[in-house]
Structure formats: structure tokens, C-alpha cells
Amino acid sequence: MTQQVQPVAPFESSPNTKKMKEKAAQIRKSFQRPKFWVMGFGWCLAACAGAANVIAFKSWNLYASHVTGSTSAMAFRLEGYHQGEYGSESLKEACLLVFSFLCGAYACGLLIDKNQVHFGGKAFYGLALVLNSSLLASAAFIPGRLLPVCLVAAACGLQNAMCTSHFGAIIRTTHVTGTMTDIGSTFGRISMIYLRKGCRRSNLNDVERAEVGVDARKLAVLFGLWSFYFMGGLFGVYMENIIPGPPQRALLLPAAFTGSVGLFYMACRQILKDYIKKLERERFEADLKEAQDVLAHMGSRLQDLEHNDQSVVELDAEMGHMIDALHEVEADFENLVRTHSRMLERTDSATSKPDKA
């Protein structure tokens, strides 16, 4: 009786194991690892925003990207205005800072038609970066106090709206309140999973491993944003003391970075698009080959099934790995189809214009 029941045990638990592996694959699919150059570019933008915000405070005693603080200041100054404690000038400053940030984000919505990083369609990333650079450079030379800091706030709003969402994670490059919130909550989720399992990774099931892996990748992106924002602010403080002239001249450094990147993108946009398509194609081929290898290996396992009951357990693990690989192939195939469809739409629209003429 015991010998008859042992081979059946793996099959009795296989439906639950299969569902668990499918759920783990869906969790991994919910957050794809960003390309290194995408993370690097976002981190550099965060450094530029950190430097611009510090320079604005050193120059005009106002933070340009603190919309939360400016909104609270509006309520505070409005109460003081009615009590006769503050003049209308301080209330106007807070209102204009919020409005300028909003105008910058609005301009980004006009230039970039989606809230995810993409290089097809009608997204003018180069023009948005050049406009950001122009706003910062203008603030470095315009005299006065309120107008230049409003230009910096508009530049921050424009930059912050350029990449609001990417690969399932909220990305903000001009302030770090939400970033620190996400870092704390994500690290808390990872800690609770390990505490429930006695702080041993070997005790984690497939779903928990997938959740920890996804959260760890998010932490790498978010902590990088915070670190570069801090380093950018530190860099801005030192450069403000080194560069001759008024403190706002240091804004030319982040302006030079965003402007040069924007001009480079505008000049090499087609080359970058072809390169990114090549990377996606290579990734698709690699995932497809991995799936084929897993299928071939599973076939050899089936041949050995008659000789070794342990092969049933190993086969179940191999099938889970195959499901993960096929999900990755599916995601890459959808990206390729979506890219090809956009190319066909642009081709059709380009060919139809002469006919209408």
C-alpha cells in the first residue's frame, strides 16, 4: 500500500503547485527590470532636480519643486492675510510656484502623449529636455526673485511629468517624499515575508520568492533615485560656491546636461529607436531559445519517468520554469507586435497624405 501511494503524492499536489507557479510568473511579469540606461537617465534627472532645488533656495530662499509645501503655504498665507499678519506678496509667491509647476507638467503633456517611457508615436522627448534646459538657463540670468524661481518650478514640473510611470513603478525625479514612502513600504513587505518564514530564504515558496524579487528590483530603482537626488543637491551647493557670479549661475550646469541630452536625442532619434528595437528582438530570441531548451529537457525527463519516481517531482519543477520562460516570451512578443503596429500606422498615415493632396 505504501509503495502504491508514494508515486501519487506529487500528482495530488501538482494542481496547487501549478497555480502557485502561474501566480509567481504573473507577479514577476508585473514589474520588468528597467534597462540600465533608463535607470541611469532617470537618476541623472533626479540629480539635476536636486541641484536646481538647492540652488533655488540658496538664491531666492524658495524651494522650486516642493508643491506640497507651497500648497500648505498658500493656506497658511491666506489665513495670515485675512488676519493682517502677512501681505499679499507672500501669498502670491506660493500661488505662483504651484501654478508654475502645473504649467510645466501641462507643457509636458502637450509634448509627450503617454505617461510611460516610449520612443515611438508623437513623443517629443528631445524638445521637452531642451525646453527644460531653456527654463533653467533663463532663470540663471533673469534678475529679480519671483520670476526666475517660477521658471525653475516650471522646469521641475516639466521634468517630473516626463516619466511618471515606468514598468509598474511610480517614478518621480524632482522630489523624494513618495520615493521614501515606497522604499519604506517595500522594505517592510520584504521584512514581513522573511519574518513569517523565520528569516530563512529556503522556507519561501514560489509566490513569496517572486514577491521578494520584484520588490528588491523596485528598491534598487527607488533607492537610486533618492541617492542621486541627494548627491545632486550636494553638488549644487558646492558648485554655487565655486562658480563666479550670483548663486543662480549654477543652474547652468543642470541646464547644460538636459539641453545636451535633448539635442543629442533629437539628432539621433532614429538610431536610438533602431537600437532599442534590436535589443528587444535579441531578448525575444533569447527567451524563445530558453523555452525551447526547457521543452527539450522536459522531453528527456519524460523518457526517464518509467525508471525513477523522483523524476515526477523534478518534472514538476521543470514545467514551472517552462511556464516562467513562456510568460517572458509572451511579453516580449506583445512588445514586438505593438511596435510593429505603430510602425504600420505611421507608414499608412504617411502614404495617405499625398493621396489626400
Image (spheres, helix red, strand yellow):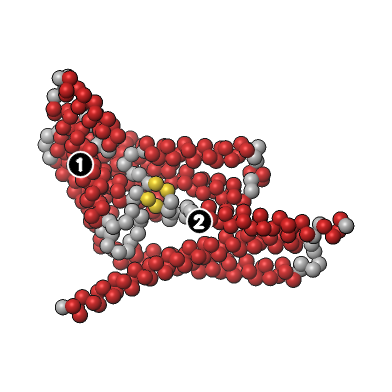
The kind of residue tagged 2 is Lys
- The residue that disc 2 covers is 29
Residue at 58 percent of width and 67 percent of height: 291
Count of number-bearing discs: 2
Q: Quadrant of residue 83?
A: top left
Left or right for 119, reference 102 = right
Neighbourhood count class around disc 1 (C-alpha, 10 Å): few under 14, some 14–19, many 20 upward: many
For the N terminus, the quadrant is bottom right
Q: Position of residue 330 (x, y in %)?
A: 50, 65
CA neighbours of label 2 inside 10 A, class few (<14), some (14 to 19), many (20+): some
- 236 or 88: which is nearer to us? 88
Which residue is disc 1 drawn over? Answer: 100
Which secondary structure, mark 1? helix
In this view of the protein, which residue sits in the foreground, 61 or 187?
187
Q: Residue at x 33, y 39 (%)?
A: 175
Residue found farthest to the left: 143
Q: Amino acid at mark 1?
A: Ser
Q: Secondary structure at mark 2?
A: helix
Q: Can residue 15 be seen here?
A: yes
Relative to 266, 30 lies left or right: right
- Residue 77 lies, with reference to residue 264, above or below; the image says above
Numbered badge on residue 204: none
Does residue 114 appear to the left or right of 224 in the view shown? left
Is residue 236 at all visible to an observer of this figure? Answer: no
Residue drawn at (49%, 48%) of the image: 217
Residue farthest to the right, as pictured: 1
x, y percent for residue 156 = 26, 43
Q: Quadrant of residue 2?
A: bottom right
